[in-house]
Image (spheres, helix red, strand yellow):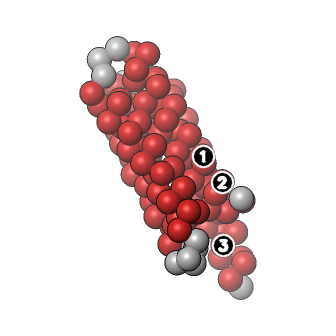
């Protein structure tokens, strides 16, 4: 029963992450794009929180690594927010996407 619930959680989080990343990169309007960046940064922070709290308290280095993955997403959102050039905005979106993908991978697969 518990493994079935974990499978459902994995599928839901993976689908939400994939849809959010696609919207983040393929949206033409900047409002949708910036909204997706901020939502996906929060989603990356959520995956970092779930990953860090799923570990025992004596696995401090692994917990810090998971929090660092979430911090990369926040840094990407800040880079996207503060930059005016499109190349820096792309770098911010890539950081947020990497945070989401690594967060889900570390939470369920690795």
Q: Are marks 2 and 3 in contact (CB under 8 Å)?
A: no
Which circle marks residue 101 in the picture? 1
Q: Are marks 2 and 1 in contact (CB under 8 Å)?
A: yes
Categorize mark 2 by other alpha carbons within 10 Å: few (<14), some (14-19), many (20+): some
Q: CA distance from mark 1 to mark 3?
A: 17 Å
**Which residue occupies the foreground of this view, 92 or 30?**
92
Residue 89 image position (x, y, % from top left): 40, 23
Q: Residue at x 43, y 16 (%)?
A: 87
Q: Residue at x 29, y 31 (%)?
A: 81
In this picture, is 78 found above or below 57? above
Decide which of tag 2 and tag 3 comes sooner along the chain: 3
Residue 106 image position (x, y, % from top left): 64, 57
Please give the residue where the numbered disc 2 appears in the rendered image. 105
Q: CA distance from mark 2 to mark 1?
A: 6 Å
Residue 54 image position (x, y, % from top left): 56, 73
**Which residue occupies the foreground of this view, 11 or 54?**
54
- Badge 2 element: helix
């Amino acid at each position: 029963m518990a493994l079935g619930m974990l499978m459902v959680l994995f599928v839901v989080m993976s689908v939400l992450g994939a849809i959010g990343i696609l919207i983040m990169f393929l949206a033409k309007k900047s409002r949708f794009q910036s909204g997706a960046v901020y939502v996906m940064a929060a989603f990356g922070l959520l995956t970092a929180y779930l990953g860090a709290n799923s570990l025992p308290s004596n696995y401090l280095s692994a917990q810090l690594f998971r929090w660092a993955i979430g911090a990369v997403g926040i840094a990407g959102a800040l880079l996207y927010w503060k930059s005016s050039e499109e190349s820096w905005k792309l770098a911010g979106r890539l950081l947020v996407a990497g945070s989401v993908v690594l967060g889900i991978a570390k939470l369920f697969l690795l």
